[in-house]
Structure formats: structure tokens, C-alpha cells
Image (tube, rainbow, N blue to C red):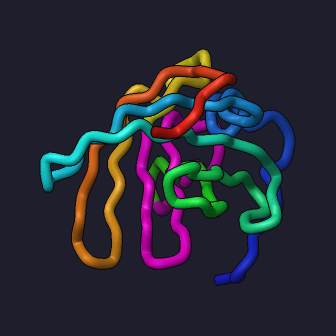
């Protein structure tokens, strides 16, 4: 498997098409009862992932992303799905769903220490993390 995959060819559909250029204000709830506000900034193709990436304001890092694959081994789908997955340094993994307007209504985050979080997001170009 290649370590760095290039951008999607042609029209990419919902993923990553409607995510690129969007800023999301997310409410983050942790299994440890923590509550935070996060800003996710999607761009692509990027420097970490040739497909697209997200900058997490709380983590202060850029995380490489791809569309969640779909289909079967006989008929796989690698773009145009309604989900995405991102993995970054420290084993942080985002897994989210995308609405037609680019909103990420739900996402989950896990890290390499086993902590889990649930996010609910809305598009907000002026987002500032808290």
C-alpha cells in the first residue's frame, strides 16, 4: 500500500467535495465527562494527505483524511461516500458523517490511549476553539 495517496480524480461527490473549505464548530463530549468546543478546518488536497485534511484547533495539528471506503471487495467505492476517516500523530482518529451542505453532524474521536469522544458540528467560518 502506498504511504501517500494522491487526490481523488474527477468529481468527488459529498466526500470530500462539500467538506473542502468548510470550518466546523463542534461540541465535543468525552467519556471522561469533559465538554469542549472544537474548530475543524477542512482543506484539500493537503500536505499531510494528498486527498484532504483537517486542522484541529484543540490539537493544534493537521490530520490526514480520506473518504470512508464503501462497497464490497468486488465493487469498492473510494470517493463520493457520506463518511470520512482521519488519522494523525499520536494515534488520533476521527470518523465522521457528512450532510449534503458539508456539515458534520456526528463524528467520533479515539486516541492511542483509548480515550473516546463524540462530536456534533455546525458550519461556522468564524469558529474559535474554547
Q: Nearer the viewer, residue 118 or 130?
A: 130
Q: Please identify the quadrant where the N terminus is shown.
A: bottom right
Residue 91 locus on image (x, y percent)? 43, 75
Residue 92 shown left or right of residue 87 in the figure? left
Q: Which residues are magenta?
A: 73-96
Question: Is 62 colored magenta in this rendering?
Answer: no
Q: Nearer the viewer, residue 96 or 77?
A: 96
Task: Name the residue rendered at 61%, 57% in the picture.
Answer: 65
Is residue 39 positioned above or below 85 on the image?
A: above
Q: Residue furthest right?
A: 10
Q: Please identify the quadrant where the C terminus is shown.
A: top left
Is residue 57 positioned above or below 103 on the image?
A: below
Task: Name the residue rendered at 27%, 50% in the picture.
Answer: 117
Question: Is 74 colored magenta in this rendering?
Answer: yes
Is residue 22 positioned above or below 124 on the image?
A: below
Task: Name the residue rendered at 74%, 68% in the picture.
Answer: 48
Amino acid at each position: 500500500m502506498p504511504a501517500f495517496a494522491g487526490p481523488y480524480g474527477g468529481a468527488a461527490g459529498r466526500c470530500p467535495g462539500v467538506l473542502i473549505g468548510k470550518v466546523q464548530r463542534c461540541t465535543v463530549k468525552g467519556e471522561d465527562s469533559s465538554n469542549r468546543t472544537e474548530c475543524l478546518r477542512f482543506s484539500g488536497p493537503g500536505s499531510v494527505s494528498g486527498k484532504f485534511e483537517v486542522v484541529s484547533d484543540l490539537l493544534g495539528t493537521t490530520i490526514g483524511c480520506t473518504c470512508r471506503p464503501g462497497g464490497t471487495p468486488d465493487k469498492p467505492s473510494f470517493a463520493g461516500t457520506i463518511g470520512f476517516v482521519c488519522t494523525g500523530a499520536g494515534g488520533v482518529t476521527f470518523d465522521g458523517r457528512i450532510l449534503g451542505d458539508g456539515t458534520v453532524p456526528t463524528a467520533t474521536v479515539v486516541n492511542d490511549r483509548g480515550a473516546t469522544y463524540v462530536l456534533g458540528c455546525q458550519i461556522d467560518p468564524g469558529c474559535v476553539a474554547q
